[in-house]
Image (tube, rainbow, N blue to C red):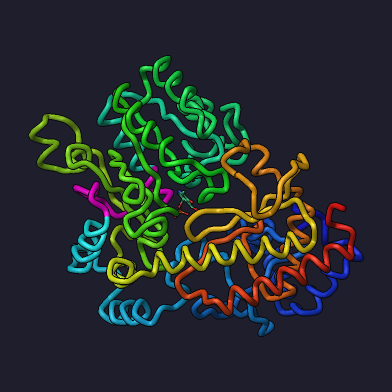
Amino acid sequence: MSTTVSDDSRTNSRIVTAYRQRTPGSAEMSRQAQDLFPSGITHDARNVDPYGIYVARAAGPHKWDVDGNKYIDYFGGHGALILGHNHPKVVAAITEAMQEGSQFGASHPREIGWANAVKRLVPSAERLRFTSSGTEATLMAVRLARAFTGKETLLRFKGHFHGWHDQMANGYSNHYDGTPTPGVLPSVAQKSVLVNPGDIAAVEAALKNNPDICAAILEPTGSSFGQVPLKAEFVQELRRLTTKYGALLIMDEVVTGFRAAPGGAQVAWGITPDLSSWAKILAGGMPGGCVTGRKDILDLLDFTASAKAGREKIGHPGTFNANPVSAAAGIACLTILAETDAVQKASDTAASLRQGLNDVLAEYGLKWSVYGTYSGFHLFVNPKNRDITPHGFDSYAVEMEELKSQPQKLNNRMRIALLVNGVDTNPRIGGLLSASHTAQDVAETVAAWREALKMLKAEGELPN
Ligand SMILES: Cc1ncc(COP(=O)(O)O)c(C=O)c1O
């Protein structure tokens, strides 16, 4: 059993007992998984104590575990599923593509359609290159920025996540002092300057004092889709300063892309980055990513342009680049987003969910809050006991450490309590909505939230 989260495996908790009773199939699979995977899991976010659910199938906003329990899903495929699970048009596109072949080792018509679907929504995409994931997209964006500017240092923001490659490994959940995480060379970690999110004076000082900065990269609406929110004005100012000091601006739209607005945060806020990274929704629920941006920068990947400029081209192989099945899903999904109000619908439903969850927090007299922007929500458990009300909380006025501070035991217990009541959130008790979530899902989630809090209160887990 996994015991690293909060040691809930050895507990008398009624919540955990109820969870075990509902999920014997998941328990058995997690036992098998212990002999296969480190911690028995295949993604760090699945580290639940005593074990996570094993999901058998999903549809729309719902998923069912191997024991037949139904959940309202707010994990949303790590943000990939703005249309919900198995949207019929996406499934039809995937099925058709699959029957025609999954890997041609050649250019194919769907990559043209996919690129055009991106360009239709993203005006800054003068050129693009498909990758297999968001991690690969940010890796390529940084490589392009270094080669284009001839500079080496990257300006990043504490708490911002850009995938798991070496240059992004420190500073998003720990090692905020710039030291390397295990297995990463100190010389690589040293090439990041980490700045507090939202601190524009610190950004300017970093750019001024470090002429070697090739680019600033950020999650435009703030880390974890606005858990630590940023305002448009901050990013607009960042755009101005990067230009002033000769650095590129990379907007990492892996989560915000096609979610904050169909064209991402950059379109929502009218900011033109030099480069952007995209994944998740981009590929309609299938694996895939891309880097987009200025033609003169993407030309570093171009055989002819590089030869003409007398420079060495940046290499870019990748077995599954622009995979035709992902392309089919991406075209279907992005076309729906371009032609319907799906993105707005997800955001509107999220607003009513935040409202309903806060109503329940108020019922319990808790000085906590559910906040968020667009189609996301986050729980703030007020570690410093600020004098706030659930509905009146200003997340922009609170620093990163405080917003991200959530006792692990409480988090885990709350997650289990919600699962027992048929709701799956992310490990921070937040989530992302899709256009398939309905008012009924919201009402059922609010009822489950009330029930979960009741269980937590009975176990003495809530503050008085
Ligand atoms: C903002 C951001 N950038 C990059 C990534 C990495 O994407 P992937 O998981 O596709 O490698 C993620 C993944 O969650 C992300 O949230």
Q: Foreground: 94 or 228?
A: 228
In this view, 195 is above or below 42: above
Q: Residue placed farthest to the top in the image?
A: 209
**The stretch drawn in magenta includes residue 345:** no
Q: Quadrant of the N terminus?
A: bottom right
Q: Nearer the viewer, residue 396 or 283?
A: 396
Relative side of 185 to 260, left or right: right
Residue lying at 71% horizontally and 68% vertically, measured from the top left: 449
**Height in image: 76 above or below 72?**
above
The x, y position of residue 390, in whole percent, is 69, 54
Horizontal placement of 464 versus 42: left or right? Answer: right
**Where does the image place residue 21, in percent across and percent down from the top left?**
81, 79
Task: State whether residue 44 appears in this view.
Answer: no
Asked if 99 appears above or below 311 in the picture, the reply is: below
Residue range of the region highlighted in magenta in the rendering: 122-138
Where residue 399 sits, quadrant-wise, is top right
Residue furthest toward the bottom?
Answer: 68
- Quadrant in the picture for residue 298: top left
> Where does residue 454 sit, x and y in percent of width and height?
82, 68
Residue 54: % across, % down: 64, 73
Residue in the foreground of this view, choosing between 331 and 196: 196
